[in-house]
Image (spheres, rainbow, N blue to C red):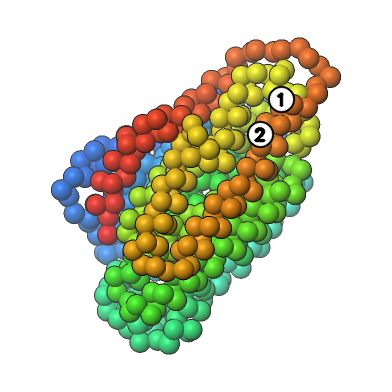
Amino acid sequence: MLVLFFLLIVALDLFKSKLIKASLPWVALTGILISLISQIYFLNNIQGKQAKIFFSGLLITDGLALYAGLLFSVAGILTIVLSVLSKHLQVKFSGRGEYYAYILVLLAGLNLMAKSVNLLMLFVALELVSIASYLLTTAIKKQQDAMESGLKYILYGTLASGVMLYGMSFLYGFGGSLSFLDTAFWANLSRLDSPFFLVIFLLTFAGFLFKIAAAPFHFWAPDVYEGAPAPIVAFFATAPKIAGFVVIIRFLLQIKNNLATTLQDDVMLLVGGISLLSLVIGNFTALWQSRARRLLAYSSVAHAGFLLAALAALATNSIEAVLFYLSVLLFMNFGIFLLVQVFEERLQIFDIKGLAGQGKTYPLLGVLAIIILISLTGLPPTAGFTSKLLLFTNIWQNYSATGNQLLLTLLLVGLLLTGVAFFYYIRIPYFLFFKRNLNPEKKVVLGREDIVLAFISFPLLLFFFQPAWLTELIRQVVLYSI
């Protein structure tokens, strides 16, 4: 469906009519909405069904893929809405058709990533996502920052893809198959020495760690977050991260089910080490940032660390906590980047100090900003608190069951660094409300951005008071997954 609407947009973009040009975002939005409705329909009918492998064994349809597709569609809809609201894009971006076409290609690639159970298909899907991402990063060709960040993104992405492909070649050579659901594939790999297997594992995961912005593959994030259009940055902070974690979950489940305990412990140690590195680098580097975009880039690294900490146990019950966290993260990221877009375009504010007193001038924006930032920190009464509570509870339960000291370390470091995150997130509300503004006039103006921002903020409150609405769906999704 997404491919058909991609072709339709490319065809419509050939016409010079201003009316047709203006309809292109709505055509893209229609395609994503149809995809979203179909995914909701399938999710509502997954009870009692089995996962299906199709397309010559390259792809799978299960609860994990369907739920990820649902999140991709929501992210795509919000990206287009933010793009329509962005005056900056409307003024500086001339190739409207190609911009919305790239978003649809990116969504198609992400869905393929989430459904891939074959190394070759996985690589093709990831490269499709990467190429579309590079093009979207450089969407505003006349802006030097966008071109510079796009070039860095391409260089880092090419390096990560090359390393990943090198690792995949080892997996294919020693595993004897391209399908990582094949038990013989893992039986062959289990004969390898532990250090060599870990090296292959890390090489293969380089591309996925790059997509989720986990350390040490996070170097692209600050520059891309600062140079790319705000709607695209919001999309990059959520959808590729979701796809990357879906792939990681699939691999870790297979490792849990098919490899010896010693190899599982080594993989757990490696995942835990990457998690700790991401938590420390992401949180402490964010403390020193003066620009909101760079702060959010390093906080994204920290979020990847929290999620990897939950997966380090290689336990099936971790999946529910991770999916809940990713669902909430989607709304938090789009909310905060819409705020960034409003402050940059409406008020010409690009650093945190420039926000001084703006919460009093624009009280509605200020209140919505507080809700989103409290949720990002992980404090009540927001869904960010619920997501972190589920994550930490899950880590504690797995530690209690296994006695693994790594899990206890991850739990204690995660709790400590949540406190660190409070300090860099709270700087924004502090400047909004407690710093003096030379213009004391209140401007309670309800614009389109404010309505969308309120809509995005609503789930952050809803899933705090009614988390069961989401957790029950996720539980059904996990039961229908491999």
Q: Amino acid at mark 1?
A: Phe
Position in image of residue 152 (x %, y %):
69, 58
Secondary structure at numbered mark 2: helix
Q: Is residue 205 above or below residue 384?
A: below
In front of the other: 209 or 289: 289
Quadrant occupied by the N terminus: top left
> Which residue does the image show at 72% across and 17% down from the upper left?
361
**Residue at numbered disc 1:** 433
Quadrant occupied by the C terminus: bottom left
Question: Left of 400 or right of it: where is 165?
Answer: right
Instruction: Note whether residue 140 is visible.
Output: no
Question: Left of 212 or right of it: where is 319?
Answer: left
Q: Is residue 243 above or below residue 464?
A: below
Q: Which mark is residue 340?
A: 2
> Which residue does the image show at 59% across and 35% down from the upper left?
373
Q: Which mark is residue 127?
A: none
Q: Residue furthest left?
A: 48
- Nearer to us of marks 1 and 2 is 1
In front of the other: 95 or 312: 312
> Which residue does the image show at 55% across and 26% down from the upper left?
453
Question: Left of 243 or right of it: where is 86?
Answer: right
Secondary structure at numbered mark 1: helix
Position in image of residue 144 (x %, y %):
77, 46
